[in-house]
Structures are given as structure tokens and as C-alpha cells.
């Protein structure tokens, strides 16, 4: 598919470069979950990502999507520029597994999240930087989506991309 790439998105060298750009340039993703009863749910959340393109977000542990993740870790994610002109298809879909971040990984995930949240601003010293604010019995938790498959949108097409190549 790369042979038709230049006509599709000429300002980028590859589909992977375009997909990374979409993740970097947007702040919100829509995460779709379903619990044991298979009822779907979609929620917009602010996200951050690490060098391996794991996606991190913070939500209340009693939110519907957090409860769904506890029952069924399989999720779908959509990241897109909602202000783009119709027909540009500047977005991507992701299949992944979500989990609550715990233990030693929590401090790293929280640092990644806060760095993006306060990007370009003086970072205040607040309780939100303390891992105890995100561990039981706290109301909010940090979640991670590990990407299994990612697809770049096109007009009437979808191309799989490997973000870690």
C-alpha cells in the first residue's frame, strides 16, 4: 500500500509517521469498552503516551469505562482531529488491552501523563503528582492501553500501522 502513499498524505514519509503525528497532535481519545453483558460504551478521555506508544489516561474507578475494563480488558480507541474539514480522515483506530496501572509502573505512568498535561506550562506541585492519589482506596486511577493493532484512516480505506517499527 505504500506505493499509493504519496497521493494519500504527501506531507508525511510513511503511514507510521502520519499515525505518530495524529497521536502527538491530539489530546483526547475516545475509548470504547464493554463489560460482561457486552453493552458498548464510549468515553472521551485526555491521554498521554510513552515511547512505546502505550496510552495512559486517568478516570474515576467507579466510571462506567473503568468498571468495564475490570470485567473485560479488550478496548477500542479512536484518535482524531474533530475540527478537520469533512473528507480529510485525519484519524486512527486502535485495538488494545486496557488495565489499571499499579505498583512500580504507576510512578512512571503518572510522570508521562503529567508531563503531557502540563506541556509548555510551569508544572505546579500538587497532590495529583503523588502516587497515593491513584491507589486504593483513592477515587481516581491511572489506566494504560497497550496497543495490539493500529489503523490509519483513509477515505474509504484503512491501513494497519506498526507504531513501534
Image (cartoon, rainbow, N blue to C red):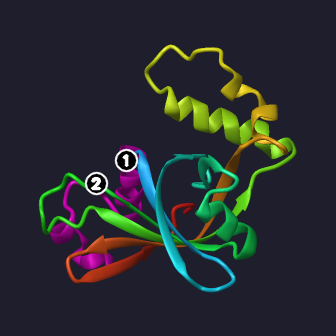
Corner quadrant of residue 48: top right
Question: How many other residues sit within 10 Å of disc 1, few (<14), some (14-19) or many (≥20)?
Answer: some
> Residues at badges 2 and 1 in contact (C-beta under 8 Å)?
yes
Q: Is residue 79 magenta?
A: no
- Main secondary structure found in the magenta portion: helix
* Residue at 70 percent of width and 22 percent of height: 127
* Residue at 76 percent of width and 33 percent of height: 133
Q: How many marks?
A: 2
Relative to 16, residue 95 above or below: below
Q: Position of residue 6 (x, y in %)?
A: 20, 67
Element at label 1: loop
User: Disc 2 marks which residue?
Assistant: 81
Of the numbered discs 2 and 1, the one sitting upstream in the chain is 1
Task: Using residue 28 as the reference point, say whether residue 128 is left or right of it.
Answer: right
Q: Position of residue 14 (x, y in %)?
A: 34, 63
What segment carries the magenta color?
1-25
Observer-nearest of 117 and 22: 117
- Gap between marks 2 and 1 measured at Cα: 7 Å
Corner quadrant of residue 7: bottom left
Relative to 128, residue 139 above or below: below
Observer-nearest of 44 and 47: 44
* Residue at 77 percent of width and 36 percent of height: 107
User: Disc 1 marks which residue?
Assistant: 26
Instruction: Name the quarter where the N terminus is drawn.
Output: bottom left
Relative to 125, residue 108 above or below: below
Element at label 2: loop
Amino acid at each position: 500500500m505504500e506505493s499509493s502513499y504519496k497521493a494519500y498524505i504527501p506531507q508525511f514519509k510513511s503511514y507510521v509517521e502520519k499515525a505518530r503525528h495524529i497521536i502527538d497532535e491530539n489530546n483526547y481519545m475516545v475509548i470504547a469498552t464493554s463489560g460482561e453483558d457486552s453493552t458498548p460504551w464510549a468515553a472521551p478521555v485526555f491521554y498521554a503516551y510513552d515511547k512505546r506508544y502505550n496510552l495512559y489516561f486517568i478516570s474515576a474507578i467507579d466510571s462506567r469505562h473503568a468498571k468495564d475494563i475490570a470485567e473485560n480488558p479488550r478496548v477500542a480507541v479512536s484518535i482524531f482531529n474533530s475540527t478537520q474539514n469533512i473528507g480529510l480522515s485525519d484519524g486512527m483506530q486502535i485495538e488494545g488491552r486496557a488495565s489499571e496501572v499499579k505498583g512500580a509502573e504507576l510512578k512512571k505512568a503518572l510522570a508521562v501523563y503529567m508531563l503531557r498535561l502540563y506541556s509548555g506550562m510551569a508544572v505546579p506541585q500538587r497532590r495529583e503528582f503523588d502516587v497515593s492519589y491513584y491507589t486504593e482506596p483513592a477515587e481516581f486511577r491511572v489506566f494504560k492501553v497497550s496497543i495490539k493493532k493500529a489503523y490509519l484512516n483513509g477515505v474509504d480505506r484503512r491501513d494497519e500501522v506498526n507504531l513501534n517499527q
